Every structure is written in C-alpha cells, then in structure tokens.
Amino acid sequence: MPRMLDVSDDVRAEIGDEEAERLLVGDNTPGNYDCTSCRTPGDAAQEPTSTVLFVGDETAVLAFAHASCIPSQVVTVSEEQLQGAVRSITASQDADSITKSDPRQAVLGVTSGLILLDGDVHPGLVVEPTGPIVRPGSDGPGDDFLTLLTEQGFRPVTDLERRPERNSGWSVLLAMGQLHAVLSPGADGTASTAWWQAHQPLHVTEGWRAAANKSNTVFVYAAPAGVIGQQPREDLLRSALERAAASGQLVAAAMPLAGT
C-alpha cells in the first residue's frame, strides 16, 4: 500500500533510486512508527511522513518522522549516537562480555524465525556460538555461554510456551527492513554497544518484519554451540528449541525493536 511518504533528493542520493521507490510504494516502510523528532506515534499510511537518514562514519540508519516535525533530510551523526549499532566487536569489548578459550574472536550465529505462542506469532532470533565460550580470563575447558548470559539478564527457558521476560537495556536493531545488530547496555550508563553485529545486514521475511512492527518486541533465544544447529524450516527450529529447553540448555530475553 503506498505511503504518504516524502523522500528528499538528499536521502534518495544516499539510498539509491531503487530503494527510494520501494519505500514510496510501501515496501520496507512501517504503517506505524515512533517519530524520530517528537517520539510520539505516527502512521505513514494516514499522515504525511518524512524519511530521515542518520549517517555515521561507517553506516546509515533510516528513520521516520511526522512531516510537520521535520522535513526529509540526511543527518550526520557519530557512531556513538547510532548507539553502537555498527561498532565492531573488539577484543576489549569481548573482555567485558564474552570470549572463547580459542584465541580467535568468538563468532555468534543468528537465525531469525517466527515463534508461535498462545496462538499468535512472534518474531524470534536464535543465537548460537560456533564454539565453546568461557569466562573472560579463564583458560580452562568448558562452556560458560549460558552462565554469562544469565548474569546479563537472560533467563533459563523451561517451557517454550512461556513468553521470555524483558531484559532492560537490550534491543534489536532493524533498519530499512533488515537486521543489523543486537544491542546491549553500555558500561556505567554509556551508549549501547553491539553485542552481536551483522557483517552485512541480514534479510528477514515480510512476516517476521510485520510481527516485529506489530509487537515492537523480539524474543531472543540463546544456546551453547552445537545445541540448535542449522535448521532449514521453522518447525524444525521449534523442535530444536524445545529439546534445548528440556535439557536445560536454553536461555531467552524479550527485547524492544529499535528502528523499523
């Protein structure tokens, strides 16, 4: 459905004609949004709406605003102001959060899928490392992944039919209809940092985006390496999550959706 959307020449130059036209005809554009200026709800299908492109040193994030608040424009900001969405997961950040015993950097695999709860579908992400993760400073064998996440606010899952509890300060960044990062709180109240960041924005299905925009909440599940595996279908992913929960190898958290 076409939106009452304004894409300025400056924004079009940054995102390209193809993406601009997709926005104008309704693709990758939310019906409802929080205005990036006044922070109150807006509806791109019912009222004039501006596209606002925030450009940092390394990436860009598209947001929406009431046309009465600000015109469509490109806004240059720092990476800190983009809440660390594209900040690389450096060794120093790993020292404060999660590392592997292997000297190579930990790699977190992320799979998106829809989770059925109480007859309704919810957007979900499943996080699984490529190898064991141990507590920073530890040289011993073992896998502390779930323990470390529990210490950061994730909760054990014993029943997949129960909604995960919200984890304060964490969020999932979706920009221009693609998944960019899972953001965690910064130390001592500083800006959020990328706990997980896509090397390239990840595609999610239209159904996933619709569910995320409807609830503004994403359920993030995590399991140790080798527990879930690559599942080609959502029903198989669900079965793998149920087995992980039954064996005490699954934690989860509900996170608000940042971006659109």
Image (cartoon, grey):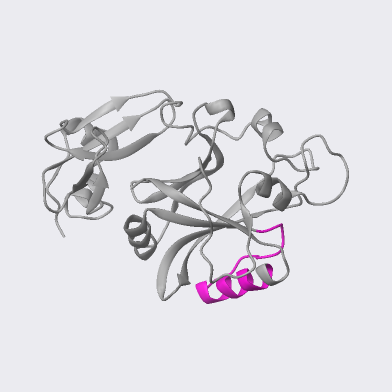
Q: Quadrant of the N terminus?
A: bottom left
Instruction: Locate residue 57, reporting x and y percent.
Output: 42, 25
Instruction: Locate residue 38, reporting x and y percent.
Output: 23, 34
Seen in the picture, residue 74 relative to 247 is either above or below; the reply is above
Instruction: Locate residue 105, reporting x and y percent.
Output: 70, 39
Seen in the picture, residue 78 relative to 233 is either above or below; the reply is above
Q: Residue at x 44, y 29 (%)?
A: 58
Left or right placement of residue 228 versus residue 254 in this view: right
Q: Residue at x 63, y 63 (%)?
A: 157
Let me know if residue 114 is in the magenta part: no
Q: Residue at x 46, y 71 (%)?
A: 117
Instruction: Locate residue 47, reporting x and y percent.
Output: 11, 47
Left or right placement of residue 173 versus residue 106 in this view: left
Left or right placement of residue 87 versus residue 2 in this view: right
Residue range (magenta): 223-244
Q: Quadrant of residue 217?
A: bottom left
Let me know if residue 229 is in the magenta part: yes
Seen in the picture, residue 13 relative to 110 is either above or below; the reply is above
Q: Quadrant of residue 51?
A: top left
**Which one is nearer the viewer's eye here, 107 or 173?**
173
Which residue is at the far right? 140
Left or right placement of residue 148 versus residue 13 in this view: right
The number of discs equals 0
**Which one is nearer the viewer's eye here, 219 or 197?**
219
